[in-house]
Image: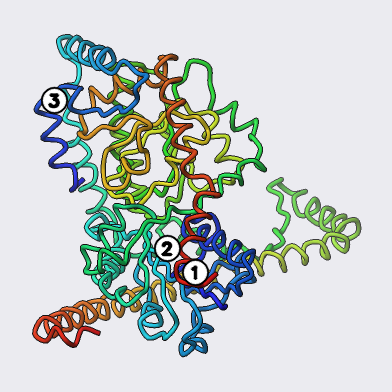
Amino acid sequence: MRVHQMTATLTFGDAVSNDIFEIDRRLKAWGLDSYIYAEHIAPRLADLCHSDAAYTRFLGETDDLLIYHYSIYTPNLELYKRTRNRKIVIYHNITPPEFFRGIDSGLEAICRTGRLMLGDLRGCELALADSDFNRRELVAAGLPQEGTGVLPIFLSLEKFANSQRELGLYRQVRRKGQVNLLYVGRLAPNKGCDDLIKILYAYRKYVYPDAHLWLVGDRSLLIYTQYLENLAARLGLQDAVTLAGRVSLNALRTYYEAADLFVYASRHEGFGVPLVESMYFDVPILAYKATAVPETLGNAGVLFDAFAYPEIAEMVHLLATDAATRQAIIANQRQRLADFTPERVEAGLHHVLAQLGAL
Amino acid sequence: MQADANESRNAQAFQDPGEIFEIRDQQIDVEALMRTVRENVARRRAEGAYHEDLDAIADEVFKDVLTAQPLLPLPLGDGQASTLIELNARWAVREVPFRSNAPLVGPLIVAVRNFWNWMSTKWYTRALLQQQVTFNALVAQAFNENADEHQAMLEKTRQLQAICQQQLEEIALLKEAVQRLQKADPSDRD
């Protein structure tokens, strides 16, 4: 059987792209002919996939299966709607456009259109989402509840096993007496990076002065990045906040290993891959209780549901310095991590395909 | 920023830590942890801590950034433009004539020096100099071409952004029209 996977963009290191390649690997291992298509393809990945235009010749194939990954508006949604293939949707969530107002009008418009078109995903045999939060969004958009399900994303944590700590960077980050707060993810308004700077301010000024916030991730939203830099400067934190940008796998490993606490203030999260990566590296997690975050954490980590900076600053200190509390949190996070093993996701995918008679 | 309003109100109402945090770990004495947080915050507040309105400061910084930022890539800044002008003026290395201000013997010194330069180094350095001039010319040309391309891309981006905006608005209108039609005739949903 031929299985096609299609999405908007395939880039290196992106969670959705990674999920697609992991699924592709399983499909091939199970003896299926697997192909990947996207509207935009990073040059490094060009040999592994095809432009979405190449999919058009399979539109009339009623025995083929299309797995359509939806995470932002893309014109190839029309191909999804027109195809006579059997169809599965995997919805990875689209950030509400309001977050980008004034920051990136193009992104705001694409997110608005993407969410507006959610209902167009009807007509598939099964609509999957990588969290129940995302699944509920599909139902709210008009997809039939009984035709929806949850399939966690493939995380590829094993990639870290082949990575190495960068000693120079580690020495730079892990200074004696310094508390390191870490955030990993895109620097974007929905991620609440500004709130992390406010938390750092409260913590340094009133609880413990030797603390540093490392913001690791894409900073291509220039206006937002400028805002973060200006906010840090205004609060006198220009030397205590580092916007590290996108980093190599080795550097990412190093930041996790040097961190005392992972802080997450995201207001809109479809899953939250860095939360699971923090579990992998035994970094205690303090996160804002919003959207899919509590679901991803399960019983692990510590959640807060109000931006009460004084209380959060105190909690930061307890989680960063109190050994017994840290150990208990880490032990719980390890248990939760077991729910995201690739074997479990693989079993879920196998079950779905078997249900549809594809295996 | 915009999404802060509700959470900030909660924060200003001095919620109890037990209402702010959620720890679902059976091994942790959550009440003891909350007591520590509660007592420390109360003590620091009594000492005058936490008086800043961090959300208000952040809003102010955000507004300043928005008003200062154009939504498109920046054209070449004044500094870059003046550097380019200087590069265009100075890429060609020119020989500086030797001069002497010494009275009477000055012209003789100049003549001797010129003769010595002609004899000892001119034919050797001229070839090197020519290589440097060629290199400088290529660098200057590359920078000028980049500046032109930057300007062209800026124009193109402006045009594309306008087209995208227009098309997205059309899509949204069409989508609404389709939804209206589907509501009017539920049998024709696809």
Would you name the residue on which mark 3 appears? Answer: B15
Give x and y (percent) for residue A112.
Answer: 25, 67
Report the amino acid beneath label 3. Gln
Report the amino acid beneath label 2. Leu
Quadrant of image for the N terminus of chain A: bottom right
Which circle, 1 or 3, is nearer the viewer?
Answer: 3
* Callout 2: SS: loop
Which circle, 2 or 3, is nearer the viewer?
Answer: 3
Find the distance from the CA under tag 2 to the CA under tag 3: 50 Å
Q: Does residue A85 lie above or below A113 as drawn?
A: below
CB under 8 Å between discs 1 and 3:
no
Find the distance from the CA under tag 1 to the CA under tag 3: 56 Å
CB under 8 Å between discs 2 and 1:
yes
Crowding at dot 2, Cα within 10 Å, few <14 / some 14-19 / many 20+, comes out as few
Would you name the residue on which mark 1 appears? Answer: B147
Q: State left or right for residue A290 relative to residue A23.
A: left
